[in-house]
Image: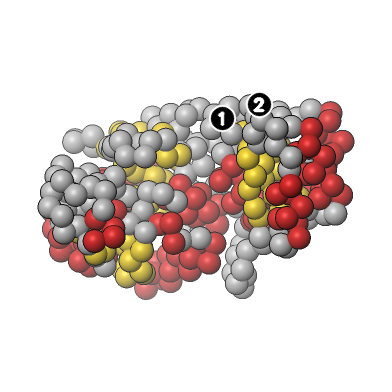
Amino acid sequence: MSKPKVLFIGTGGTMSALGIGGPFDIMDYGAKGRFMEADEIIRHWPQVLEKADVVPIKYRNVASTALGPVEWLEILALCHSSLAAHPDAAGIVIGHGTATLEETAYFLSLTHKLAVPIVVVGAQRPSSGLATDAPMNLANGIRVAADPFARGMGALVVLNDEINAAREVTKTSTSRMQTFRSPDFGVLGHCDGDKIAWYRKPLRRMAPDTEFDLSGIATLPRVDCMLSYAGGDGVAAAAYAAAGAKGIVIGGFAPGFMSPSEAEALGAVAKQGVAVVVASRAGSGRVFGTQRKRELGFIDADNLTVQKARILLMLALTRSSDPAEIARMFAEY
């Protein structure tokens, strides 16, 4: 029986890192070591070839703190061009640093137009570290990408034998292996030794069935983030607006409140046409609408984290600047 073909795009990150401090160097490897290209990773962990015929595709070798909207557009284009070059591929795996992994995954989950799955994987320990999770996460990502059941679920995140939806997952611990969690709803399935075991599908709209077509778009609208805190004066709102922000997301007090000064400052920029979205700094739970927020023209982020709400707002602003239309998108996605 022939093996499925899976494309592997390398972007760098801990999975690709080889430190020079020995097997216990699980902190300074990025500064002192080097990052492997996609083909080097496959040669370093040839065991993953037992699960599929893997086609390595080079992108760049950086920590994920160096990736942002410009790179998201490039990765999106690379996914499409790579599948066009290999139309028989069952899926795509993207190796990514864990710091911003959830953001790249959610962006792809809203924008790709491919029939095959996109699975984003990373590692908490470098490939040179003792008991590294890199090879198993990569192997499991390949298995999930090759699974027909994974189709139509946007982008998926696979680490620690768990499959999470890009919309729902977030990094919850700095260095523990079980860092990626979906606080409100839990995993979609598990990567067990005998099979990929699925238990549920996400219901919100996701790729490839979305309205966000970024073909021909070179840059995304600027959206900045604020965080509510006791005594916050909201001065950042005016500064962001002056810098050209088309939208601002505030991580408010749970369940989506803010200080009076923050509300006043954000209300002022909302009158100037800046889209203001209210998320929660709690990291879990739905933000609900109130009469006061509606009067100020604010939009609720549902249960999206601040960083995810920023991505959806950026994409929404490529389609409309109408607060009611943007609110509709937050209710659907």
Question: Which one is earlier in the sequence, the residue at label 1 or at label 2?
Answer: 2
Q: Is residue 237 left or right of residue 168?
A: right
Residue 284, quarter of picture: top right
Whole-percent x and y of residue 331? 68, 38
Residue, x 29% and y 37% (percent of image)? Answer: 177
Quarter assignment of residue 301: top right
| Mark 1: amino acid | Ala
Q: How is the image coloured?
A: secondary structure
Q: Which residue is mark 1?
A: 282
Quadrant location, the C terminus: top right
Please name whichever residue, 217 or 147, is drawn nearer the observer in this view of the structure: 217
Can you give x and y, in whole percent of width and height, for residue 45 in the image? Answer: 15, 56
Image quarter hosting the N terminus: bottom left
Residue 163 spot, x, y in % from top left: 36, 38
* Element assignment for label 1: loop
Mark linked to residue 255: 2
Looking at the rendered structure, which numbered label has been put on residue 30? none
Give the quarter of the image for residue 171: top left
Local packing at callout 2 (Cα closer than 10 Å; few below 14, some 14-19, many 20+) is some
Tell me which residue sits at (79%, 32%) in the image: 260
Q: Label 1, label 2: how many angstroms apart (C-alpha)? A: 8 Å
Measuring 59% from the left and 51% from the top, which residue is drawn there? 311
- Amino acid on which disc 2 is placed: Pro
Mark 1–mark 2 contact, CB under 8 Å? yes
How many neighbours does mark 1 have within 10 angstroms: few (below 14), some (14-19), or many (20 or more)? Answer: some
Does the image show residue 108? yes
258 or 188, which is in the foreground? Answer: 258
Residue 127 placement (x, y as % from top left)? 19, 53
Position of 74 compared to 92: left or right?
right
